[in-house]
Image (cartoon, rainbow, N blue to C red):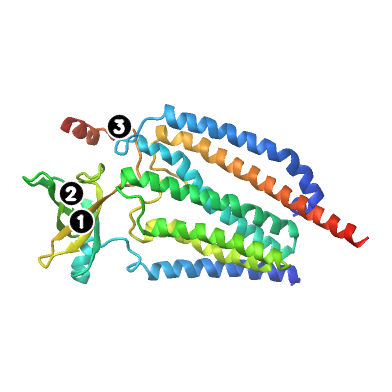
């Protein structure tokens, strides 16, 4: 093996080792590096009480209820396995709607419900014009 | 690879790079113009996000070039370490600044996009944080490469740093798949895309336009660096005689 080949093998092995290390570290950090708790995480690990956390998932269909004071919103967040009821008082983001992703910042209560101080909308990776979105868009325009 | 070795000759490289620089830059600007015009006027708005989706025609190419730039920098670093050719080191240094600029453009446009859609300018989520790290790693590379050159180093340390930095690329790519993040999952895969065709097509123009522009800038910077090296060598010769 010429020194050139030796260096090439060494460099490529180095890159492979670095990338593999990064991927291993990522999968090990899976739980710690999460941006939010999903309702099923809470069901599995117990309630993270007494500290500010984020809760993420899909707003369940038909679960949004607006309270009489005009600013308080009650809704249910689910991830297909478990659900958590959420209360939030304030202005919701434009993209906040049923069957859509949401990340709520706040804290859990002892009864397993969540009180949010801030809402972030999480959209999915699909982009389409209104006419393709069809029904979803229709219901939205009918509301207005 | 005879063609690559032929290119490694600086004189031959310059003979190709000189006409290629304006060609790439002009073609890139033209494609970019078409893509921006089409993206602003010819495509429908998104059903959820409305017109704010149009920032994707800048945000996505900037992200691709921020990450692609580092791949190029790492490949040049490997070529430099293996074949010890100075032109590869010049290429790696030339890529660093435009790569950092595009990473910054990606972060800024993402922040502007995040405000109306997610409702926040910035969150420490996996994708956003790892992209910010890439920007810092670019800055670190530039500082290290300059320090190495000033101290008369042989360029091996910045090259090793360039290889080490590739660790970030899979993290950025898989952050949205493996971790739960505020940033949505990947829209464009190798074979399919979840962006409707009528919204997607100008992205091809801005993507190739920015890429050609990037290549033009890199060639420009490489030529400037080679000219500087040559003038320094000439000054040294004159000082000696």
SS at badge 3 = helix
Disc 2 marks which residue? A90
Could you tell me residue B193's position as x and y percent? 42, 43
| Residue at screen point 52% across, 40% down | B207
| Residue at screen point 20% across, 56% down | A117
Q: For the residues tagged 2 and 3, is the chain the same?
A: yes
Could you tell me how far apart the alpha carbons at marks 2 and 3 are, in whole angstroms?
A: 28 Å
Q: Quadrant of residue B229?
A: bottom right
Could you tell me residue B41's position as x and y percent? 43, 27
Q: In the image, is residue B15 above or below residue B240?
A: above
In-front residue for pair B123/A121: B123
Contact between marks 2 and 3 (CB within 8 A): the answer is no
Disc 1 marks which residue? A117
Q: Is residue A21 left or right of residue A81?
A: right
Could you tell me residue A44's position as x and y percent? 21, 69
Q: Which mark is residue B219?
A: none
Which chain does the residue under circle 2 lie in?
A
Query: How would you rate the neighbour count of disc 2 (Cα within 10 Å): few for under 14, some for 14-19, many for 20 or more?
Result: few
SS at badge 1 = strand
Image quarter (top left, top right, bottom left or bottom right) of the C terminus of chain B = bottom right
Q: In the image, is residue A72 above or below residue B33?
A: below
Q: Quadrant of residue A62?
A: top left
Contact between marks 2 and 1 (CB within 8 A): the answer is yes
SS at badge 2 = loop
Most distant residue in the top direction? B42
Disc 3 marks which residue? A130
* Tally of numbered tags: 3
User: Which circle, 1 or 3, is nearer the viewer?
Assistant: 1
Could you tell me residue A26's position as x and y percent? 41, 67
| Residue at screen point 52% across, 35% down | B205
């Amino acid at each position: 093996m010429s020194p050139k080949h030796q260096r090439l093998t060494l460099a490529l092995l180095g890159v492979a080792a670095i990338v593999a290390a990064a991927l291993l570290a990522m999968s090990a950090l899976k739980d710690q590096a999460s941006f939010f708790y999903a309702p099923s995480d809470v069901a599995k690990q117990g309630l993270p009480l007494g500290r500010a956390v984020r809760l993420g998932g899909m707003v369940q269909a038909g679960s949004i209820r607006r309270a009489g004071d005009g600013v308080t919103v009650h809704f249910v967040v689910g991830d297909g396995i478990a659900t958590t009821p959420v209360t939030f008082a304030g202005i919701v983001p434009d993209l906040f709607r049923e069957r859509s992703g949401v990340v709520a910042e706040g804290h859990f209560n002892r009864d397993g419900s969540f009180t949010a101080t801030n809402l972030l909308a999480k959209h999915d990776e699909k982009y389409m014009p209104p006419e393709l979105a069809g029904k979803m868009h229709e219901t939205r325009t009918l509301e207005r | 690879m005879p063609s690559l070795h032929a290119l490694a000759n600086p004189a031959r490289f310059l003979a190709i790079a000189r006409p290629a620089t304006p060609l790439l830059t002009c073609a890139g600007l033209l494609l970019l113009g078409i893509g921006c015009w089409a993206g602003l006027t010819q495509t429908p708005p998104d059903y959820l996000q409305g017109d704010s989706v149009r920032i994707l025609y800048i945000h996505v190419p900037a992200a691709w070039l921020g990450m692609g730039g580092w791949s190029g920098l790492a490949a040049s670093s490997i070529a430099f370490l293996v074949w010890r050719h100075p032109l590869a080191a010049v290429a790696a240094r030339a890529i660093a600044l435009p790569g950092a600029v595009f990473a910054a453009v990606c972060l800024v446009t993402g922040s502007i996009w995040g405000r109306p859609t997610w409702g926040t300018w910035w969150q420490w989520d996996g994708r956003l944080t790892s992209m910010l790290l890439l920007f810092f790693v670019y800055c670190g590379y530039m500082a290290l490469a300059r320090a190495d050159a000033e101290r008369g180093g042989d360029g091996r340390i910045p090259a090793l740093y360039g290889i080490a930095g590739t660790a970030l690329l899979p993290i950025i790519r898989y952050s949205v798949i493996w971790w739960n993040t505020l940033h949505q999952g990947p829209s464009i895969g190798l074979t399919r895309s979840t962006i409707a065709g009528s919204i997607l097509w100008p992205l091809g123009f801005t993507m190739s336009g920015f890429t050609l522009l990037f290549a033009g800038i890199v060639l420009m910077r490489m030529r400037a660096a080679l000219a500087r090296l040559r003038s320094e060598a000439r000054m040294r010769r004159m000082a000696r005689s």
